[in-house]
Amino acid sequence: MTETINIRRAAPADRAALGRLWQELMEFHYRLAPDIFGLAEDALSCWLEWIAQAMEDDNRIVLVAEAEGTLLGYIHGCLDERPPVYRDRRHGTICEICVGEDWRRRGVGGKLVAALFEWFGERGLPEVHIGAAACNPVANAFWRAMGFSPHMVQMRRVVDLAGDSTN
């Protein structure tokens, strides 16, 4: 059976389903790297407040994919600027994307990205940036399939709070 997947702006009524998808995303990342993706006790309520603000912000958009009244995934994007020293300052940023596990590899993520690119295009943005965890081969393969390629390397070093600066 082929379901019709509809992409639309997220609405306040989507709050609970968005929260479940976000928790699935965070649990996936926690399994990859618990030292990086450990969450605060109130993480879900903080995220729900943050995403509600994003839905109201003209410089941000939250889109959802649904089929037969069920939320399958979401994507969150925003308008961004680099410092004024650059010729091309404005760009889009994909902040988050999540497709529920049962709907992965069925084109939902691609539809969400395409809809977000349409929104970015309407705003005349010349390029789109994303960040993906280096330890997440699934996400990195997805982004490459969507036409993205690395342009910056972000690095991390844990601070030794015991005072040893030789690490």
Image (tube, rainbow, N blue to C red):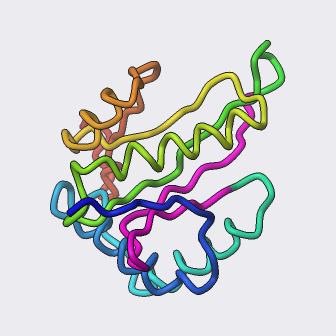
Q: In the image as oriented, which residue stretches furthest toward the left? A: 31
Above or below, 5 relative to 93: below
> What residue is at 30 percent from the left and 51 percent from the top?
160
* Quarter-of-image position of residue 34: bottom left
- The percent coordinates of residue 12 (x first, y second) are 63, 83
* Quarter-of-image position of residue 25: bottom left
108 displayed left or right of 104: right
Above or below, 113 relative to 124: below
* Quarter-of-image position of residue 147: top left
Counting every numbered tag in the picture gives 0
122 displayed left or right of 136: right
115 displayed left or right of 86: left
Task: Tell me where the magenta segment starts and ends, as one range.
Answer: 61-82
| Foreground pick, 109 / 82 | 109
> What residue is at 20 percent from the left and 56 percent from the top?
33
| Foreground pick, 14 / 164 | 14
- The percent coordinates of residue 26 (x first, y second) are 31, 67
Of the 4 image quadrants, the one containing the C terminus is top left
Above or below, 70 relative to 66: below
Of the 4 image quadrants, the one containing the N terminus is bottom left
Magenta stretch, main secondary structure class? strand
- The percent coordinates of residue 73 (x first, y second) are 39, 64
Q: Is residue 49 magenta?
A: no
- The percent coordinates of residue 7 (x first, y second) are 52, 59
Q: In the image as oriented, which residue stretches furthest toward the top? A: 87
| Foreground pick, 120 / 85 | 120
